[in-house]
Amino acid sequence: MSDCKNCAEYDFVRGCCPKYCEVIRRTMDEITPRWIPVTERLPEEKTEVLVCDKDEFMYIGEYEVFENGKGYWLESVEYRFITDVMAWMPLPEPWKGEDDGTD
């Protein structure tokens, strides 16, 4: 498969199969933040993500679906609708700091 030659694991897995490549891609999506076009997929409903609209403005927002099945984006701070969303990205985990052993 020609995609395997572009796979980051190709040197280690000579002749890797498409199923293995898909597992790697999904894992990399989970650990490496990247912009995901809304045409590719949408985030889980009511999960805060970083959103970019067609004018390259960024918001923290979430995707929700009305009872009629129509989806919309909602900005998380002022709860305004976000229009013309082009892509989204998972938010990083919150910083937890280091435990220095003091109470």
Image (cartoon, rainbow, N blue to C red):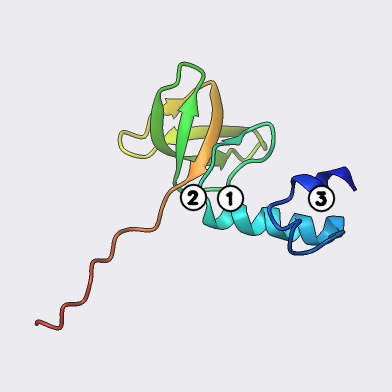
Residue type, numbered disc 3: Cys
Dividing the picture into quadrants, the one containing residue 57 is: top left
Count of numbered badges drawn on the protein: 3
Q: Which mark is residue 47?
A: 2
Dividing the picture into quadrants, the one containing residue 28 is: bottom right
Front of the two marks 3 and 1: 3
Residue 42 coordinates in the image, percent (x, y): 62, 41
Residue at which label 3 appears: 4
Asked if residue 16 is positioned above or below residue 43 in the image, the reply reads below
Q: Which element is circle 3 on?
A: helix
Residue 73 coordinates in the image, percent (x, y): 50, 33
Residue 22 coordinates in the image, percent (x, y): 76, 55
Asked if residue 63 is positioned above or below residue 93 in the image, the reply reads above
Give how far apart the Cα atoms at labels 3 and 1 are.
29 Å
Q: Please give the name of the residue rendered at 79% of the width and 62% of the height, measured from the top-left corner.
A: 20
With 56 as the anchor, is 40 left or right in this view? Answer: right
Q: Please give the name of the residue rendered at 21% of the width and 77% of the height, measured from the top-left corner.
A: 99
> Nearer the N terminus, badge 3 or badge 1?
3
Residue type, numbered disc 2: Thr
